[in-house]
Image (cartoon, rainbow, N blue to C red):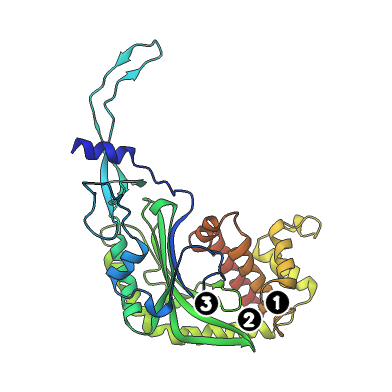
C-alpha cells in the first residue's frame, strides 16, 4: 500500500498541456482545428458505452507495471484524501523537524485510475461523473442508428473531455452549395471545477466551423455540477433526440434569413463591434481590436466565402466569427479546443448568433 501511495504521489500528467487523446471520423480528419488524433471510419466508430470508453479513455498502463491501478481497459476517476508527506523539513535556522503525517480534512485530489496522475482537487461533496458514465449518456444516441460519434477527445491529461455525435439525416443547404449538419455534444471535466454540459449546434460542412447558439428547447440538463443528484438531472439528455429534427428545421430557417440579409461594409463592422462588445470610444477602424480585424479578413477570404450568396450577407459575417473561434482564437489546437467547448470561444459564437438574430428580427 505504501509503495502504491508513493507511486501515486510521484505520478505526473505528462500531457497536461494539450490534446492528449482524440478520435475523429475520416469525414472530419484534416478539416478541423484538430488536425491530429486517431482517424476511424464512420461505420467503425464505437456505439456502446464500453466501446466508446475503450476508444476515448483507454487505460495507459506501462507494460512493466506489475500492479496496475485499474483492471479495466479504460480509466476512471478516484477521489483520494490529501495528506501531508511526513518528510523531514528544514527550518530557516537550518534545524530539522519531523512532523507526523496528517490527513487534511475535507480536501481531496482527483486521480486517474490508470496512471495515478492528479487531474484536480475537490471538496467533500464532489461526486465525480466517471468517464464510463459520460459514455453512457452518449449511448442512446449512438445505439439509436440515427447518430454516430464524430469527434471525441481528452484535454490536459484527463482534466476535460468531450463526445460529439453527428445526427444522421439532418443536413441542409443554407445557400446552394453551403450545407450544414446537426450535432449534439456532451462535455465534462474531471478537474473538480468543470460541470457536465450538453450542447447542440451545427457544423458547416465546407470548413467544419462550429455554429453554436443557445436554445431554450434544450436547457434541461444543459449544465450540471458534479454532485450526488447529477445523474437524475443528466437522465433528461437522452430524451432530447426526439426533438432534434424540429429544432434543426427552425435553425435552418434562421440561417437562411441571415443569407438573405445583405450587409454593407459599415454594417458588417458594426455587427462585429457588437459581437465583441467593443466600447464606443474604440469603434474606429484604427482602434479596432485584433479579433474584429481578423473577422473582417475572414469575411472577405475565409473558408466558404467564395460560395455564391455568402460574401456580403449576414450569413457570411456570422461565419467569419465562427471561423475565427475555430481556427484563430488560441495559439495551439488544445487551446482552441478548450475555448470552443468550455471557454470564451463558445460564448463568442453564441453571441454572434444572438446579434445576428436581432438584426433579422428587427
Residue 76 seen by the camera: yes
* Mark sitting earlier along the chain (1/2): 1
Q: Which residue is mark 2?
A: 361
Q: Is residue 194 left or right of residue 362?
A: left
Disc 3 on helix, strand or loop?
strand
Q: Residue pushed farthest left?
A: 1
Q: Position of residue 202 (x, y in %)?
A: 52, 77
Quadrant location of residue 294? Answer: bottom right
Residue at point 36% right, 54% down?
190
> Residue 298: which quarter of the image?
bottom right
Q: Residue 268: x percent and y percent?
A: 74, 72
Mark 1 and mark 3: Cα distance apart in space? 18 Å
Between 193 and 39, the one nearer to me in the picture? 39
Q: Secondary structure at mark 2?
A: helix
Picture residue at 23% right of the left edge, 53% below the top: 70
Q: In the rendered image, which residue does mark 1 sit on?
A: 305
Which quadrant of the view contains residue 284? bottom right
Tell me the CA gap for discs 2 and 3. 21 Å
The disc, 2 or 3, on the residue closer to the chain's N-terminal end is 3
Tell me which residue sits at (30%, 70%) in the image.
51
* Image depth: mark 2 or mark 3 in front: 3
Residue on which disc 3 sits: 202
Residue at 26 percent across and 62 percent down: it is 229
In the rendered image, the quadrant that contains the C terminus is bottom right
Amino acid at each position: 500500500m505504501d509503495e502504491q501511495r508513493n507511486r501515486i504521489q510521484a505520478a505526473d500528467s505528462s500531457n497536461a498541456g494539450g490534446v492528449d487523446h482524440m478520435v475523429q471520423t475520416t469525414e472530419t480528419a484534416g478539416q478541423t482545428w484538430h488536425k491530429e488524433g486517431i482517424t476511424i471510419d464512420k461505420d467503425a466508430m464505437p456505439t456502446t458505452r464500453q466501446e466508446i470508453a475503450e476508444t476515448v479513455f483507454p487505460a495507459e498502463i506501462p507494460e512493466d507495471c506489475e500492479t496496475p491501478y485499474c483492471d479495466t481497459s479504460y480509466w476512471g476517476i478516484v477521489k483520494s484524501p490529501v495528506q501531508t508527506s511526513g518528510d523531514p523539513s528544514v527550518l530557516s535556522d537550518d534545524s530539522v523537524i519531523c512532523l507526523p503525517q496528517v490527513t487534511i480534512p475535507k480536501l481531496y485530489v482527483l486521480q486517474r485510475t490508470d496512471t495515478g496522475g492528479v487531474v484536480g482537487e475537490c471538496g467533500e461533496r464532489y461526486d465525480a461523473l466517471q468517464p464510463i458514465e459520460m459514455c453512457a449518456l452518449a449511448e442512446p444516441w449512438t445505439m439509436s442508428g440515427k447518430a454516430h460519434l464524430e469527434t471525441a477527445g481528452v484535454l490536459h491529461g484527463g482534466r476535460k473531455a468531450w463526445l460529439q455525435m453527428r445526427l444522421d439525416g439532418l443536413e441542409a443547404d443554407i445557400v446552394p452549395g453551403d450545407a450544414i449538419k446537426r450535432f449534439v455534444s456532451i462535455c465534462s471535466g474531471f478537474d473538480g471545477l468543470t460541470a457536465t454540459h450538453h450542447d447542440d449546434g451545427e457544423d458547416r460542412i465546407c470548413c467544419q466551423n462550429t455554429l453554436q447558439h443557445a436554445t431554450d428547447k434544450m436547457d434541461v440538463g444543459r449544465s450540471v455540477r458534479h454532485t450526488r443528484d447529477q445523474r437524475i438531472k443528466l437522465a433528461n439528455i437522452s430524451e432530447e433526440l426526439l426533438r432534434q429534427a424540429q429544432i434543426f428545421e427552425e435553425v435552418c430557417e434562421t440561417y437562411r434569413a441571415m443569407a438573405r440579409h445583405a450587409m454593407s461594409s459599415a454594417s458588417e463592422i458594426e455587427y462585429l463591434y457588437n459581437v465583441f462588445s467593443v466600447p464606443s470610444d474604440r469603434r474606429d477602424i484604427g482602434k479596432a481590436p485584433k479579433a474584429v480585424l481578423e473577422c473582417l479578413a475572414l469575411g472577405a477570404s475565409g473558408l466558404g466565402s467564395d460560395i455564391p450568396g455568402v460574401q456580403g450577407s449576414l450569413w457570411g459575417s456570422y461565419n467569419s466569427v465562427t471561423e475565427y473561434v475555430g481556427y484563430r482564437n488560441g495559439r495551439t489546437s488544445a487551446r482552441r479546443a478548450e475555448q470552443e467547448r468550455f471557454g470564451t470561444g463558445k460564448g463568442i459564437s453564441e453571441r454572434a448568433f444572438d446579434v445576428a438574430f436581432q438584426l433579422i428580427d428587427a
